[in-house]
């Protein structure tokens, strides 16, 4: 069970950096699975973001997503629409920034007692809520959409799929941490 595994911060620097790199790459790859439905596309990125936090923990989950956003800020076209730096000036910018804090928060919750699947799912739901919080604030204050349009474009179409992504992440997290720790021991 997850509660019997040591925290990820106990891993060596090389394994921590490898984990950060793996989840940065997973987030990049999940951005390639995109369905355009409006100003905010449907992607699998929330699944990767939540897995990063639930598997790596708060600090390294946060770092994996910070690296992802930093690569985009440096001009790499790794976002869902392959815009590079321009993505950080568009309607999805605040969602991307929210990824960083969602992974960190979900990881923090797992490190502090979310040891069962349903508890990890709740941690994932909190992470999704953080993505939405950043996203809707950006759509409203930066893009200028009114609150009704923000709800319709940035939250409502994603609620059910994101709850399922959080459940999938919660179910996969224990296996991911076990794999990470097993590779360290070999």
Image (spheres, rainbow, N blue to C red):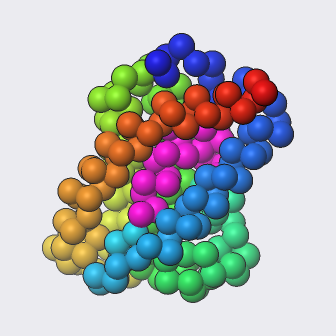
Please give the range of residues in magenta: 44-64
Magenta stretch holds residue 57: yes
x%, y% of residue 36? 34, 83
x%, y% of residue 75? 70, 81
- Can residue 66 be seen here? The reply is no
Left of 52 or right of it: where is 94? left
Residue drawn at x 71%, y 53% is 21
Magenta stretch holds residue 3: no
Residue drawn at x 19%, y 73% is 152
Residue drawn at x 69%, y 66% is 70
Foreground residue among 50 and 151: 50
Majority SS type along the magenta span: helix
Q: Is residue 139 above or below residue 129?
A: below
x%, y% of residue 113? 44, 19
Residue drawn at x 26%, y 64% is 158
Left of 5 or right of it: where is 44? left
Residue 78 position by quadrant: bottom right
- Quadrant occupied by the C terminus: top right
- Can residue 185 be seen here? The reply is yes
Give the number of callouts: 0
x%, y% of residue 141? 37, 73
In the orientation shown, which residue stands out farthest toward the top?
4
Residue 92 position by quadrant: bottom left
């Amino acid at each position: 069970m997850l509660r019997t595994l040591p925290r990820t911060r106990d891993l060596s620097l090389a394994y921590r950096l490898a984990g950060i790199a793996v989840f940065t790459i997973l987030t990049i790859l999940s951005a390639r699975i995109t369905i355009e439905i409006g100003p905010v596309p449907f992607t699998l990125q929330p699944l990767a973001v939540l897995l990063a936090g639930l598997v790596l923990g708060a600090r390294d989950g946060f770092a994996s997503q910070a690296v992802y956003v930093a690569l985009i800020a440096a001009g790499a076209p790794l976002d869902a629409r392959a815009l590079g730096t321009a993505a950080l000036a568009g309607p999805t910018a605040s969602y991307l920034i929210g990824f960083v804090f969602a992974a960190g928060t979900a990881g923090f919750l797992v490190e502090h007692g979310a040891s069962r699947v349903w508890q990890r799912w709740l941690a994932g739901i909190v992470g999704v809520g953080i993505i939405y919080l950043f996203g809707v604030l950006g759509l409203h204050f930066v893009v200028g959409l009114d609150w009704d349009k923000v709800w319709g474009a940035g939250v409502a179409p994603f609620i059910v799929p994101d709850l399922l992504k959080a459940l999938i992440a919660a179910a996969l997290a224990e296996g991911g941490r076990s794999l990470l720790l097993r590779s360290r021991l070999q």
